[in-house]
Image (spheres, grey):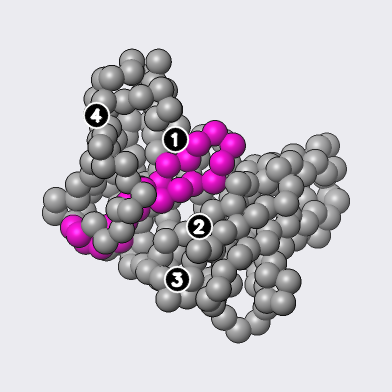
Amino acid sequence: AQSVTQLDSQVPVFEEAPVELRCNYSSSVSVYLFWYVQYPNQGLQLLLKYLSGSTLVKGINGFEAEFNKSQTSFHLRKPSVHISDTAEYFCAVTSSGNTGKLIFGQGTTLQVKP
Amino acid sequence: EAGVVQSPRYKIIEKKQPVAFWCNPISGHNTLYWYLQNLGQGPELLIRYENEEAVDDSQLPKDRFSAERLKGVDSTLKIQPAELGDSAVYLCASSLRGGDNEQFFGPGTRLTVL
């Protein structure tokens, strides 16, 4: 069975500061990894995904994430956040042999303060 | 291109009443998903369709929940009878197919059971 743990439920940060949202996963097979963002009263939007190849993945809105197989982590980073980045962020995993069942973490609320 | 459409956006009912949610996926997307999102949690898969076939409904509480996707396009999720614990957001998503394909999410239906 697979699982995802997002280590921080809330991350407060000041505008223009860097941020890292942490994600660890558990799986006995090869995985695909995803980060989604959810703005209030909206559905989830894909930020980035890791399928294979380079372990550093760049996504939309200036976000990037690094896949670390030895530490089973997929942390999300942004060098300088904006007020508009305030949202809920979800890490998700699916096995590379699976046909799309995503297992989500509990979510991390990013609160960007002026 | 229109995104995933869900209706209604909000629904308030009394316990033991029936309720239905409707989803229209992105045109051409063969795979459709229904997720349950409890407050403060990540989405959990209820059922996945490939065209009109339910290929994964292992997490769907079949005593009270049912779903259909008769023509392989739009889908309906029903609860009968609703319980207090069913209060949550019900998300619909679609993708071209399963696997590593990006899932596009609708805005969700927020259900409140009184």
* Most common secondary structure along the magenta stretch: strand
Distance CA(mark 3)–CA(mark 2): 13 Å
Distance CA(mark 2)–CA(mark 4): 26 Å
Circle 1 residues within 10 Å: few <14, some 14–19, many ≥20: many
- Residue at position x 80%, y 54% from top? A19
* Residue A63 pos. (x, y %): 69, 61
Q: Which residue was labeled with disc 3?
A: B100
A100 or B27, which is in the foreground? A100
- Residue at position x 32%, y 41% from top? B61
**Chain under callout 1:** B
Decide if residue B102 is on the left or right side of residue B55. right
- Residue range highlighted in magenta: B31-53
* B32 within the magenta span: yes
Element type where label 2 sits in the image: strand
Q: Is residue B70 above or below residue A83?
A: below
* B98 within the magenta span: no
Number of the front mark, 4 or 3: 4
- Which callout, 4 or 3, points at the residue further toward the start of the chain? 4
Element type where label 4 sits in the image: loop
Q: Which residue was labeled with disc 1?
A: B89
Amino acid on which the number 1 mark rests in the picture: Val
Q: Are marks 4 and 1 in contact (CB under 8 Å)?
A: no
Q: Which residue was labeled with disc 2?
A: A103
Q: Are marks 2 and 4 on the same chain?
A: no
Amino acid on which the number 3 mark rests in the picture: Asp
**Chain under callout 3:** B
- Residue at position x 26%, y 42% from top? B62
Q: Which residue was labeled with disc 4?
A: B80
Element type where label 3 sits in the image: loop
Q: Are marks 4 and 3 on the same chain?
A: yes
